[in-house]
Image (tube, helix red, strand yellow):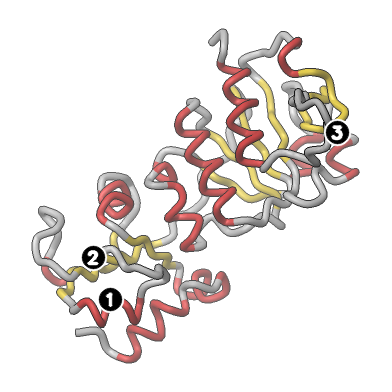
Amino acid sequence: MVSKNQIKTITGLQQKKYRKQHKLFFAEGIKVVQELLNSNFELHHLYATTANLFAGLPNHKVSIITDDELKKISALTTPQSCLALFTMPDEKPLTTTGLIVALDDVRDPGNLGTIIRLCDWFGVDQLVCSAECVDVYNPKVVQATMGSLTRVNVVYTNLKEYLATAETPVFGTFMDGQNIYKQELPQNGIIVLGNEANGISAEIEALSTNRIAIPRFGNLQQTESLNVATAAAIILSEFRRNF
């Protein structure tokens, strides 16, 4: 059974201020929860509609609940048999070598979650986010990562200061940049992607040592821009082409 206080606490975790207050976040569905259980993330409590979904969990950290109770705590339109609370870990140190992705004010949870999955797919261990980016522990972000959150180090920092001290080239993505398909791309560098509506801010643009673009091939050339996660997939693919 889930008490009223537990319902209030869990649903409150949909807001960043309560996640920070309790130092907890939640994940839903067998796939995502299993990935987190297999990682270094610490389980706080599991709520499931079926017993023994996951092996080896201590009894005091598992509650078997009804479908109706799961609906009361779920952030999904269609709840997926389990919801688990995890302790928010301390941020790991920033790495400065290899291929790094940096985000300047990306606000959409689905975009951030997808970019984390892309980093995982393309072997990018470090994702740097400006302080204005959507919170990585937003339930929609966690869900969209499909477990890749466990393999990508996401750090929030002052992006301007971080890039100003970077010792590797900074590749800013712009509509009027150099054609990415005609560039010799290194294996070490920082790829900067900007806000969904406004792109890269002026202060971050000034720190870009290389300006790259994905060219448009449509006859009318009227498409305004690519979705930032779609752009990330194309750009990372090009950087890894000769890896």
Image mark for residue 207 = 3
C-alpha gap between disc 2 and disc 3: 47 Å
Three-letter amino acid code of the residue under disc 3 = Leu
Report the residue marked by disc 2.
81
Q: Are marks 2 and 1 in contact (CB under 8 Å)?
A: yes
Camera-nearest residue between 68 and 39: 68
Side (left or right) of 153 relative to 202 = left
Give the alpha-carbon distance from disc 3 to disc 1, as whole Å: 47 Å
Task: Please name the amino acid that badge 2 sits on.
Answer: Ser
Under mark 1, the amino acid is Leu
First in residue order: circle 2 vs circle 1:
1
Q: Which mark is residue 209?
A: none
Q: Which residue is mark 1?
A: 70
- Whether residue 117 is situated above or below residue 187 in the rendered picture: below
Find numbered disc 1 in the image and state the secondary structure of the residue it sits on. helix
Q: Name the image quarter holding residue 109.
A: bottom right
Q: At 82% across and 49% down in the image, what residue appears?
A: 198
Q: Quadrant of residue 167?
A: top right
For the question of whether residue 170 can be seen, the reply is no
CA gap between label 2 and label 1 equals 8 Å
